[in-house]
Image: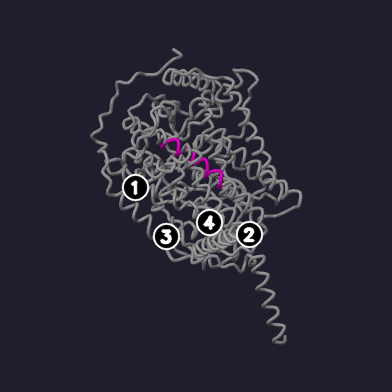
């Protein structure tokens, strides 16, 4: 080859890399990291179009909306000082809100085209709903000078009490879960924050071996880091019986009228169903009594029907994910958006997002656009995920071509709610309430945790990422049974040990090491991007 | 008219300049670096020093009503 041709080919290659981005195998994403921090020497060049999309429609757009949403949900300009006061007062807010764009970066690394767009819209919705929730907390917070009038109209509830319980008052009150933002969201965005709360629980002499979620949720209260925005509270057992202990400590610290509505384990039993339905009615009476506001059944029906619309679209998404290669949403966006939305209940932002995602989804199906062309294995993720490494699936696709199609938490609320008669509506609401995170499958009995097999088939998955929450006594109890089943069914399953929010027990790097070992020693495969095999992000958000 | 054009030109150049600066911030992850090395340690220090209520001094009141309605 002459020198001239060689220079010409190099120029062509450079031009192609500039315009289209490098091919997957040449990206060397691991070279972009600064050691230990997870920061980038520079952000990724995704090709001209996608880099510009990321810069304008994700980075700039979201930074902009992080300010405008504060004003939107904080009552205009006065929202800004309110927010700053909140940042100064609450660790979970200050340390989490600011690095939020890095949460996008981690989850969307290596993504291109329609997949990038659809996944980013999911992130945007979660960010917006998070801002709505904490701005409502701050606006009503008596610790930082919030409005007493709003305080009276802001009931609180455990994060696993479905927001739908409050639909009959959504026209006059706005419910805000106690732990969704201070605990759940913080773990994903900045995994350092929660460690303070876990340690706080142990600092008063509580043992360190229960589930760290229970410890962290206690710790937020023990550190006096929960805004005083609520006159009364609805709790559950957070569907894990370890959390009952959390509720006792929360009740101690909150000192508020409290109604407990635990999700029972034997939820297939019609008598338990009946009991749960009556408990919802009792809860409604409690809310009426505490707020002095009667229920509005039309409001309830309206929100349930709107929630059903969200569910119907989710089913369409599952159908595309299960039966085609054209699903444009990555594993982490799918998992987080779905659990957030289905637990939070009907909100305008979910409808706006679904509308945008529908357009992308339909385009991908019509034009046969495969957003994950390097897929080697279709993975289903089962049990409870490590919150500090929910974006493992982005890494696993970039490094190994493991495409996480669906996960257990997405499949929990697999139902619409009938609104034709009061009794039907109540019974369906009871079932939805019972199908709470963790209770629906993880600690919902043998039959339900083994729904893995039928979902594996339904979603055409050939591999399982089996989460192994080391401090969940419920799931530890079925570990051996799963081992036996995987062997008997000849299923490739990678056990991913973790301690839910606590990265100190099993680090992200150790998790990657376990996947690397399986992929090399069992699957005999070579990485797509070897720079991602080993890197140190131990101090990263 | 001339002044309007001049003002528009200045506005255009200022916006373009700002856009380029923001792109550099984005490209070199300067937002992340500023937050990681500057803002977060400062805030963390503040939160660590904050005086907090001693939880063990809070009295656990157990005399609240038992809310049961369907008896």
In front of the other: A420 or A409: A420
Mark closer to the chain start, 1 or 2: 2
Local secondary structure at mark 4: helix
Residues beneath discs 2 and 3 located on the same chain: no
Residues beneath discs 1 and 4 located on the same chain: yes
Q: Which residue is disc 2 drawn over?
A: A50
Tag in front: 3 or 4: 3
Residue A86 pos. (x, y %): 38, 42
Q: Which residue is disc 1 drawn over?
A: A196
Callout 2: few (<14), some (14-19), or many (20+) C-alpha neighbours within 10 Å? many
Local secondary structure at mark 2: helix
Relative to A216, does residue A247 appear above or below in the rendering?
above
Q: Which residue is disc 3 drawn over?
A: B34
Q: Which residue is disc 4 drawn over?
A: A105
Q: Are marks 1 and 4 in contact (CB under 8 Å)?
A: no
- Quarter occupied by residue A16: bottom right
Measured Cα–Cα span from mark 2 to mark 4: 13 Å
Mark closer to the chain start, 1 or 4: 4
- Residue visible at 30% across and 23% down in the picture: B62
Tag in front: 2 or 4: 2
Q: Numbered disc 4: what chain?
A: A
């Amino acid at each position: 080859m002459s020198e001239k041709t060689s220079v010409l080919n190099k120029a062509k290659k450079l031009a192609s890399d500039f315009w289209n981005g490098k091919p997957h195998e040449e990206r060397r994403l691991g070279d972009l990291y600064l050691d230990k921090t997870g920061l980038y020497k520079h952000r990724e060049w995704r090709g001209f179009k996608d880099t510009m999309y990321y810069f304008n429609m994700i980075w700039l757009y979201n930074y902009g909306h992080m300010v405008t949403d504060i004003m939107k949900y904080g009552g205009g300009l006065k929202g800004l000082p309110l927010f700053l006061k909140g940042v100064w007062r609450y660790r979970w807010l200050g340390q989490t809100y600011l690095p939020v764009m890095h949460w996008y970066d981690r989850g969307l690394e290596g993504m291109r085209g329609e997949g990038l767009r659809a996944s980013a819209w999911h992130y945007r919705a979660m960010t917006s709903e998070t801002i709505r929730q904490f701005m409502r907390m701050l606006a009503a917070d008596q610790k930082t000078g919030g409005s007493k009038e709003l305080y009276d109209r802001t009931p609180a509830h455990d994060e696993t009490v479905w927001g739908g319980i409050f639909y009959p008052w959504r026209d006059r009150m706005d419910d805000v879960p106690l732990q969704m933002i201070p605990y759940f969201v913080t773990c994903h965005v900045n995994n350092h924050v929660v460690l303070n709360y876990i340690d706080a629980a142990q600092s008063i002499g509580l043992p360190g071996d229960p589930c760290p979620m229970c410890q962290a949720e206690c710790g937020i209260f023990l550190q006096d880091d929960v805004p005083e925005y609520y006159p009364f509270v609805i709790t559950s057992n957070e569907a894990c019986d370890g959390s009952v202990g959390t509720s006792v400590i929360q009740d101690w610290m909150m000192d508020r009228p409290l109604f407990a509505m635990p999700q029972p384990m034997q939820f297939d039993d019609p008598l338990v169903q009946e009991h749960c339905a009556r408990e919802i009615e009792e809860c409604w009476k409690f809310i009426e009594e505490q707020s002095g506001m009667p229920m509005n059944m039309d409001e309830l029906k309206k929100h349930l029907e709107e929630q059903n619309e969200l569910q119907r679209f989710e089913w369409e998404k599952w159908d595309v994910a299960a039966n085609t290669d054209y699903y444009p949403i990555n594993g982490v966006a799918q998992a987080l958006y779905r659990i957030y939305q289905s637990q939070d209940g009907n909100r305008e932002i979910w409808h706006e997002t679904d509308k945008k995602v529908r357009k992308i989804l339909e385009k991908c199906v019509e034009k046969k656009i495969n957003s994950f062309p390097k897929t080697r294995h279709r993975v289903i993720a089962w049990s409870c995920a490590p919150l500090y490494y929910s974006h493992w699936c982005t890494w696993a696709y970039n490094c190994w071509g493991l495409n996480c199609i669906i996960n257990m938490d997405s499949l929990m609320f697999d139902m619409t709610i009938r609104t034709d008669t009061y009794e039907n509506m109540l019974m369906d609401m009871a079932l939805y309430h019972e199908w709470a995170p963790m209770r629906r499958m993880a600690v919902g009995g043998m039959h339900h945790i083994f729904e893995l097999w039928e979902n594996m088939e339904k979603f055409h998955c050939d591999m399982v990422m089996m989460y192994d929450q080391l401090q969940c006594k419920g799931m530890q109890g079925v570990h051996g049974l799963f081992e036996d089943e995987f062997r008997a069914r000849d299923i490739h399953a990678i056990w991913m040990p973790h301690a839910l929010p606590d990265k100190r027990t099993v680090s992200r790097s150790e998790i990657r090491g376990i996947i690397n070992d399986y992929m090399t020693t069992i699957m005999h495969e070579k990485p797509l991007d070897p720079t991602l095999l080993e890197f140190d992000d131990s101090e990263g958000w | 008219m001339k002044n309007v054009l001049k003002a528009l030109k200045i506005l255009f150049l200022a916006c373009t300049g700002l856009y380029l600066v923001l792109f550099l911030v984005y490209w070199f992850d300067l937002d992340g670096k500023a937050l990681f090395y500057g803002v977060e340690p400062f805030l963390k220090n503040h939160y660590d020093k904050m005086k907090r209520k001693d939880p063990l001094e809070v009295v656990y009141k157990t005399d609240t009503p038992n809310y049961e309605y369907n008896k």
